[in-house]
Structure formats: C-alpha cells, structure tokens
Image (cartoon, grey):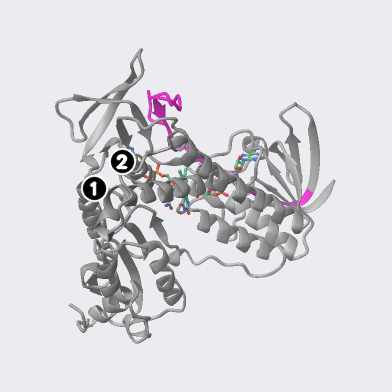
Amino acid sequence: MSYDLVVIGTGPGGYVCAIRAAQLGLRTAVVEKRATHGGTCLNVGCIPSKALLHASEAFEEANTHFADLGIDVGTPKLDLKKMMAFKAEGVAGNTKGVEFLLKKNKVETFHGTGRIAGAGRVEVIAEDGGNQMLETKSIVIATGSDVARLPGVTIDEKVVVSSTGALELDRVPKKLLVIGAGVIGLELGSVWRRLGSEVTVVEYLDRVLPGMDGEVGKQFQRILTKQGIAFKLSTKVTGVEVGKKGGATVTVEPAAGGAAETLQADVVLVCIGRTPYTEGLGLDTVGVQRDDKGRILTDSHYATNVTGIYAIGDVIAGPMLAHKAEDEGVAIAEMLAGQSGHVNYGVIPNVVYTFPEVASVGKTEEELKKDGVAYNAGKFPFTANGRAKANGTTDGFVKVLADAQTDRVLGVHIVGADAGNLIAEVAVAMEFGASSEDIARTCHAHPTLTEAVKEAALAVNKRAIHV
Ligand code: FAD
Ligand code: NAI
C-alpha cells in the first residue's frame, strides 16, 4: 500500500491534516490506535469537558439563579448518570463526525499502533497483533500528549484521577482535591463544585493560570473563591496516600519549605500539565530528535531531523491546544502539497471555559514589560456594559494592550461571560494588524457584550464612554 502521506494519530492535528492533504489531492492514510477518531480532544478532553461544563452550569443556574429571574422550578435534582450520558452523546456525535469526514474525503483509515519502520515506512500493529506495512512519501506524527504524572503518586482513575477519570466519576465526591490551578483544574474543579463537591485547589506557584495575564489571574481567582472554590497557593504536594476504605490523605507543605499538613479528600485530581506522547513510535530506531521535555524537534516547516518525517500538535513545542494542532495540520498539508502553509503563533487564542470564561490572545502585560515594549492599556468592566447588567453577568473586564507608538493591538485579555466568543473578533483584528483605534471605530451592535471590547479599545486612548 503506497501513499503520498501517512498521518499517525487522528486528534485535531492529525485528522485535520489528513483531510486538508486529501483536499489538495494527496493520497492519504491515517493510523489511529484508539477505537474512535478525534484524539484526546474529542474523546477525553475538550468535548466531554465542555459538555459537563455546559450541563453543570445549567444545573447551577437552575439551583441558584432561576429564582432571581422569577422562575420557580423548586430545587433541581441531579441525575449524574443522565448527565454523563449527555456527555457521551456529545462525544459520540463528534467522533462519528470525524469518521464521516475522513471517509468523505477518501482518507484511508487503519486502526492500530503506528510505528515508523524507517523513512517512508509505517508499520500498523493491530490490537490482535496483526501487522501491515504502509509505504509513503511523507509521514506526519500527530500523536499528541499524555497526562503528566506526579512522582510517587499513582493515578488509579478512581480515587486519584487524571482529567480522564474526573470526566467519568460515578458519584459527586464530597471533597475533591485538585493538584494544579491550571486550565484543567479550574474547569473540572468548577464542574464538580457546581454539582456539590467541596473543592480545594493546591497550586505550587503563587497564582492561578500561570502564563495568563497576572491581573486576569488575580480577578479570576477572586471570582472562583466567591463561588466557593478554596485555593492553597505556593503549596506543594509531597504525598498522596489512598485509604483502605477509599478516599485519600494528601500531604502538602509550603513551596518554599516549612511545616507539612495533611488534607483529606474523597477524590484527588492530578492536573499538573501534559507531556508529549511518543511511545511505541520507534523514534529512537529512526533517529528522530526530541528536546529535553520529550517534544519532537521540528524546524519552522514542521520537519524533523529525518527527511520525510514531520510532526505537529501537542507532540511538538507550543501551546497544547486543539486549534493550534489543527492549524499546524492545515499548514503542513499545504506545504507538502507545494503551497505555503503558515501559522501565526502570535495570535493563538486561549480560553478557559468556566463561568465566567477567561480568554486571551497575544501578549500579557508581564510579557510586554519583560520585553521592554512601551504600551497603553485600556480596560472596561462588565459592570458598565448594558447587556451584562441586563443579564446579571457583570463579573470581569476586557483589557486591550496596544503599542504606545503605533497603537497596534498587542494583546487582549478578558474575564467575563462568553469571553471565548468575544476573543474571536480581536484575533481577527490582530491577524490584520489592527490598531486599538480600528476596534474602537468599528460599530458594535447594542446591546451586546462585544461593546465592552470596543469600550476597552476606546479606553486605550482614555475616551471610553460608559465609565
Ligand atoms: P491528540 O488529540 O492527543 O491526538 C493524538 C492521537 O494519536 C490520539 O488519538 C492517540 O490515540 C493517537 N496515537 C498516539 N500514538 C499513536 C501511535 N503510535 N499510533 C497510532 N495512533 C497513535 N484544547 C483546546 O484547544 N480547547 C479545550 O477546550 C481543551 N480542553 C481540554 C480538556 C482536557 C480535559 C484535556 C486533557 C485537553 C484539552 N485540550 C483542549 C487540549 C487538546 O485536547 C489538545 O491540545 C489536542 O487534543 C491536541 O491534538 P493532537 O492532534 O496534537 O493530539
Ligand atoms: P496547566 O499547565 O494548564 O496547569 C498545570 C498547573 O499545575 C500549573 O498551574 C502548574 O504551576 C501547576 N503545577 C505543576 N506541578 C505542580 C505540583 N507538583 N503541585 C502543584 N501544582 C503544580 O496543565 P493542565 O491544567 O494539566 O492542562 C494540560 C493542558 O491541557 C494545558 O496545557 C492546556 O493547554 C490543555 N487544556 C486546555 C484547555 C482549554 O483550552 N480550555 C482545557 C484543558 C486543558
């Protein structure tokens, strides 16, 4: 069997790459070891977590907010089994959708573990041990990432869980201890808090969401604390001991050293990041180089050091995000078809799908200060936005950072309802090299939350109207 391109892994990076390559006329095959396509994102990541975030938010709305809207539904009752079935339906709909798209684009699919036998050769090892050899001009590795482990802590997916286990719990834990105040910790911590858990988040650093704008992190932590999540920052976990009758004792101590204390939990969620996944690929045999974090090293054209082997998505450097993997998939497919694919790494939005949401694109204030870039900041709170007031969703703000000399937008950071959708207009504006003046002079519909983006852009030059 001979192809122009074999893609290993059908997560957002791999399946999008394969479809784009097929669109451009390349004879394309994919190899996937999971039973369903879609990778981490569709099976155990973006999609199931968003389904539970949606359902748990609706539960909380009914529980605490409906009465304020004049809707009396009594006390809502949780049917967790049904909620999980709702989540599973969303996952199945999406993974089947990818299967359909691969077929529609005439991408051949092989199920099994892909192992690179040499440049131009991929062996597919099926679960039953059977194998097939695929010959190909190019190979794209899109094998994604796996949960990062905490040394000495065994994840059993029952008491000590990764995100995968936390998306599958069969009852609401009374006490949930989350290790890591990153995206997974705050999203899944929010899900289980809404459903009734007492949630404590232990974070090694002195802030939540490291990497995001500092002011955003601070305000967001305040909001989550108000919602009932407890935080222990600057604290490290030194041990997790699972009890004989279930539950766990977690030992923590100040990150800077000091007296240890123990915390009890019914479930412990370990979410301290993810690591690139290259197991079973045979990289050492073919000599594909990796960096000290295990990420496959590529040049700006996604080429590894071995001719004809490329890599994209979570398995290479950069933010571990589905849309980043997808865009890289399109770019490499276009390059292999003789076009000039491109990803603008300066404009990759980052969204946390809690309530309120957090969304950012471009540089943070901390990064601009570190780089010595002079900038002006314009900020607008949702308390001053008409639609947010009408909806009763006034937590948060929009912050626009623009170059002091040129007024070019360098970064935008939002905490607020629907921030994940609001960030899209800014990403488009930044892609086109917009100034804050361009956003400020663009007519935004009233009454919408997008007016807060316009007002923050106006605030860059100190002429916001509604504050
Ligand atoms: P993956 O999606 O990991 O896919 C890799 C695929 O390769 C897998 O299906 C795997 O089975 C397969 N594979 C591995 N090795 C082999 C082999 N040797 N042979 C054959 N197949 C192989 N990102 C967002 O942008 N938005 C979100 O809301 C979001 N939410 C998330 C929530 C959670 C709980 C988690 C864990 C992640 C989330 N992410 C989110 C991150 C997102 O899932 C990843 O960035 C994305 O899936 C990376 O895509 P990928 O194609 O590089 O790899
Ligand atoms: P993360 O990198 O977002 O956060 C990990 C957190 O754990 C950090 O705050 C880190 O300081 C902390 N930490 C590390 N070691 C620790 C220790 N020993 N003790 C206490 N804290 C420790 O990683 P997370 O949340 O696991 O997510 C993994 C990846 O998945 C992210 O990189 C993200 O890109 C992706 N993802 C994206 C989502 C989205 O886009 N909405 C949702 C969920 C995941």
Q: Over which residues does the magenta segment extend?
A: 136-163
Instruction: Report the side of 299 relative to 97 (left or right).
Output: left
* For residue 364, above or below residue 183: below
**Within the magenta stretch, is there residue 146?**
yes
Q: Residue at x 63, y 38 (%)?
A: 283
Label 1, residues with CA under 10 Å away: few <14, some 14-19, many ≥20: few
Instruction: Look at mark 1 in the image and give the residue it sits on.
Output: 227
**Within the magenta stretch, is there residue 95?**
no
Q: Position of residue 163 (x, y in %)?
A: 44, 38
Q: Are marks 2 and 1 in contact (CB under 8 Å)?
A: yes
* For residue 136, above or below residue 241: below
Instruction: Report the side of 201 relative to 261 (left or right).
Output: right
Instruction: Look at mark 2 in the image and give the residue it sits on.
Output: 193
Q: Position of residue 245 (x, y in %)?
A: 35, 14
Give amino acid for label 1.
Gln
Q: Quadrant of residue 349?
A: bottom left
Q: Quadrant of residue 414?
A: bottom left
- Residue 227 can be seen in this image: yes
The yes-or-no answer for disc 1 within 8 Å of ligand 2 is no
Identify which residue, 452 or 152, lies in the foreground. 452
Q: Position of residue 312 (x, y in %)?
A: 58, 52
Q: Residue at x 48, y 53 (%)?
A: 321
